[in-house]
Image (tube, rainbow, N blue to C red):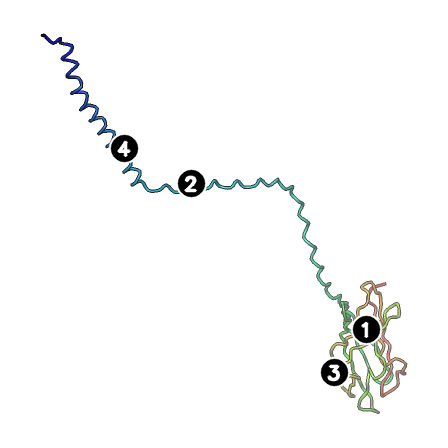
Amino acid sequence: MKIPSDTSHTLTSPRLAWPVRRKGAALAVATAALLLAGCKERPPEAPSAAPAATPATTPPVAAQPVPPPAAAPAAAAAPKRVPLSIQGVAAAGVTVRVKAVEIGADATVLDVSISFANRITDTTMLALADTYLQDESGARLHIKRPDNNRDITIREGETLDGQLVFMGAVAPSARKLKLVFNDGNQGDNIVAPGLVVDLPLQGG
């Protein structure tokens, strides 16, 4: 009996199909193995970084006016110096020349030249009693007595050139001062002669 040609095709198909199916399975297994190897060799992924925190939005602050710097304290006023050429004479033989007055914030200073000439005594004192400056209101600025000559003793025939310091300041608007030596004593007192000298500070 003759086998039809299509039956021969049907018998040979299973032999050809089986190896194809095995080859396909083998490829599938190999591929799976490769995939597994790739999974084993791949390093673990680093954890993804946490998303950066979004900074809180700060509402805009209105510009504040800057306060002006505190005014620096005014510099101490320079002493007021008034040049003079005034002379006073006491009968006991004392001559006092006032050459300038300097009015400061804490003291008033007189530039003076004081001479003494007397044939009866060798010395006299110009500040044994109260000695001071007096302003127009009657306020008195007492003398600051020198440590080495508290009574301002002067020897006969000598001249003392220097400064007399009075504690306190007079008003810059003062027009005159009065210089008083040995308040209450007479001018002919040879121990401590009294003497008053007017000191004009402004014209008129």
Check disc 4 and give the amino acid type: Ala
Q: Could you tell me residue 139's position as x and y percent?
A: 86, 70
Which sits in the foreground, 146 or 115? 146
Judged from the image, the secondary structure of the residue bearing numbered disc 1 is strand
Q: Which residue is identified by label 4?
A: 32
Residue under the point 82% across and 76% down: 142
- How many marks do you count on the picture? 4
Could you give the CA–CA distance between mark 2 and mark 1, rounded to whole angstroms?
A: 101 Å
Classify residue 119 by image quadrant: bottom right
| Residues at marks 3 and 2 touching, judged by CB atoms closer than 8 Å | no
Q: Which residue is identified by label 1?
A: 86
Check disc 2 and give the amino acid type: Ser
- Please tell me whether mark 2 or mark 1 is closer to you in this view: 2
Residue 147 badge: 3
Q: Nearer the N terminus, badge 2 or badge 4? A: 4
Could you give the CA–CA distance between mark 2 and mark 4, rounded to whole angstroms?
A: 28 Å
